[in-house]
């Protein structure tokens, strides 16, 4: 498999800086979005509640690593799994909200676009990740543990009209986690996975 001009463009420092700035602001906005829920969350659960901004924070660390010529492998594994997982999850939840309510607010459409982009960027940069099986196992434990916190201890994100469907949503989320862990293995860890060097 040969590198495409898109993959080469992604490795350009100006693009990495642009993505870093966008993801920093997106991460800050995400934590603000969770502000009300975090204010009523027990302290020991707080690290596991703001799922999407934490995923983008992982990617911020990955991008910083790229810019200084390093691979922060554990954060690459965490970023790939969580960006795809919570990117897809948020898109699905907002579409379900649209189906349930018959309408979706402007910020719902913004969430669909921004979280869809999260998933895409996580996958697009997978050719530059260097994490190994040990990193993937740790990231997988974090991901499944987060699902337990969300759906056993009921710390999942607040989605209003969808609260009555928490059990099927929890089931969907668990298998989405398994899929994303498998995807991370397929894209990065397996022996014949495609690798590129940053410019």
Image: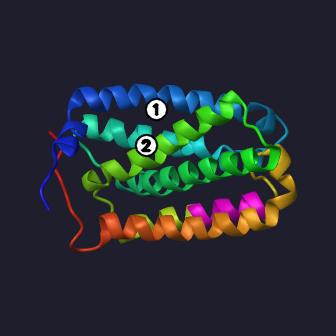
> Do callouts 2 and 1 mark residues in contact (Cβ within 8 Å)?
yes
Q: Which quarter of the figure has residue 177?
A: bottom right
Residue 96 bears which disc, if any?
A: none
Looking at marks 2 and 1 on the same chain, the residue that comes earlier in the sequence is marked by 1
What is the residue that sits farthest to the left in this orientation?
A: 2
What is the residue that sits farthest to the front in this orientation?
A: 102
Task: Inspect the magenta stretch and tell me whether residue 78 lies in it.
Answer: no
Residue 141 visible at all: yes
Q: Determine whether the residue tagged by mark 1 lies in a helix, strand or loop.
A: helix
Residue in view at x 78 percent, y 43 percent: 102
Across and down, in percent, residue 23 comes to 46, 32
Residue 59 bears which disc, if any?
A: 2
Q: In which quarter of the image is the C terminus?
A: top left
Residue in view at x 49 percent, y 50 percent: 83
Query: Which scheme is used to colour this image of the protein?
Result: rainbow
Q: Determine whether the residue tagged by mark 2 lies in a helix, strand or loop.
A: helix
Across and down, in percent, residue 144 comes to 61, 66
Mark 1 residue crowding within 10 angstroms, few (<14) / some (14–19) / many (20+): many
84, above or below 23, in the image: below
Residue in view at x 35 percent, y 38 percent: 63
**Bounds of the magenta segment:** 143-151
Mark 2 residue crowding within 10 angstroms, few (<14) / some (14–19) / many (20+): many
55, above or below 153, in the image: above
Q: Measure the alpha-carbon separation of dots 2 and 1.
A: 8 Å
Residue 72 visible at all: no
On the image, numbered disc 1 is attached to which residue? Answer: 23
């Amino acid at each position: 498999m040969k590198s495409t001009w898109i993959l080469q463009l992604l490795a350009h420092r100006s693009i990495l800086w642009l993505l870093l700035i966008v993801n920093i602001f997106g991460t800050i906005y995400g934590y603000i979005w969770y502000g009300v829920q975090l204010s009523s969350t027990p302290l020991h659960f707080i690290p596991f509640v703001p799922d999407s901004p934490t995923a983008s924070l992982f990617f911020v660390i990955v991008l910083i690593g790229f810019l200084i010529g390093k691979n922060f492998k554990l954060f690459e594994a965490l970023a790939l799994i969580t960006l795809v997982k919570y990117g897809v999850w948020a898109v699905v939840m907002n579409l379900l909200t649209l189906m349930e309510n018959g309408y979706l607010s402007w910020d719902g459409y913004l969430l669909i676009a921004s979280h869809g982009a999260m998933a895409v960027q996580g996958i697009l940069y997978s050719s530059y990740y260097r994490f190994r099986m040990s990193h993937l196992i740790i990231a997988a434990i974090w991901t499944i543990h987060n699902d337990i916190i969300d759906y056993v201890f009921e710390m999942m994100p607040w989605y209003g009209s969808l609260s009555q469907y928490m059990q099927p949503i929890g089931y969907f989320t668990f298998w989405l986690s398994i899929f994303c862990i498998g995807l991370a293995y397929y894209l990065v860890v397996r022996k014949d996975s495609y690798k590129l060097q940053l410019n």
